[in-house]
Amino acid sequence: MEQLKISHQTLKEFIESPFGNPDNQKRLQYEDRYQKYKRNNKIRVEATLEIDKNYFIHLKVPSESQKGTTVYYDVVVQFFTTNSDVEKELNLRNYYVQFFSNSPGFVYQYATLYRIEGYLIETLTDKFTPGALEILPDKANKDYKLYYDSTIYYACRYLQDNRMVILGKLNFKIFKRKTTENFFKDIQSFEYVNLDRDISKLEQGIREEIAKDTALSKKDELKLEKNKQIGLDIRKKKEARMSTFKDPSAETKIIKAGRSTKNRSIKVIRPKPKKGHR
């Protein structure tokens, strides 16, 4: 994996040339997807937080693949700067950005790579499955290419479209403001998102069955109740397993964005070379 020539980017720079990669054709493809996506999906700001001159925005991004469901992904953008002059500005346009998303596409393809390059929000690493950020995406992104994840791009474009309202610093004092504890507690872990996806798929299957015959027989009703119980059992088992993870009510330690992974050593498991290759 090649080392990046740039260490940080503003929101505008990241949208136009993510990681310094000006692939206009690919970016236009994402832009076309975004324009179609926003016609039928509503991204919303869930909460904002300002702490230690760092600004966090938590967005809820509807699933693109599971249309008609209630599956939303949590995307968080952190704005930070090391420039004292930029700190005095009244908006975040010249601040650098870091990201978090609990969408499977981001977790499996990019999360570890974003962390290595200093683009992942270190404060939220506990939201990933333990050990997930120590494994490179050998299967999902075997060439270790750095680019957008769709949820990251959609969130960034939404912020850019609404920058006059959302990116002003004064808005962080009144708009969707939460306490530090509640802000981080309300961001779902990757495990919980996967659980919601499983339940949503099950419910969608049930709805499809009902649509085939709106006049349910007694046998159909028993089958429906059985499927609902299966869903509840799945949730209970997964929640019991996840209870061994970090207590969501525990205090979150804020990690300053300046402390990127590039300046620290982290354990990353690199894929083993295939037989016959050196």
Image (cartoon, rainbow, N blue to C red):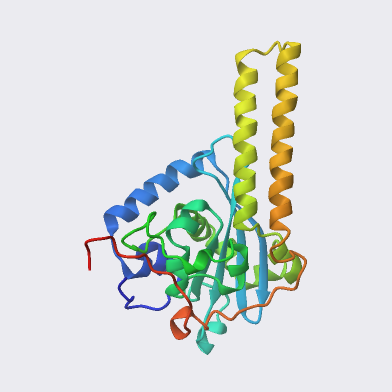
Between 185 and 248, the residue placed more toward the observer is 248
The relative height of residue 194 versus residue 246 in the rendered view (above or below) is: above
Between 81 and 100, the residue placed more toward the observer is 100
Q: Position of residue 195 (x, y in %)?
A: 64, 46
- Asked whether residue 39 is in view, the answer is yes
Q: Quadrant of the C terminus?
A: bottom left
Q: Is residue 234 left or right of residue 259?
A: right
Q: Position of residue 11 (x, y in %)?
A: 46, 68
Using the rendered view, name the quadrant where residue 146 is placed. Answer: bottom left
Q: Position of residue 118 (x, y in %)?
A: 46, 75
Q: Give the farthest residue toward the front.
A: 275
Between 97 and 265, the residue placed more toward the observer is 265
Q: Position of residue 261 (x, y in %)?
A: 47, 79
Q: Could you tell me which residue is drawn at 71 percent across and 70 percent down?
A: 173
Number of on-image labels = 0
Q: Is residue 88 left or right of residue 29?
A: right
Using the rendered view, name the quadrant where residue 71 is placed. Answer: top right
- Asked whether residue 9 is in view, the answer is no
Q: Could you tell me which residue is drawn at 49 percent across and 40 percent down?
A: 65
Q: Could you tell me which residue is drawn at 44 percent across and 74 percent down?
A: 116
Using the rendered view, name the quadrant where residue 67 is placed. Answer: top right
Q: Give the farthest residue toward the bottom.
A: 84
The relative height of residue 58 versus residue 65 in the rendered view (above or below) is: below
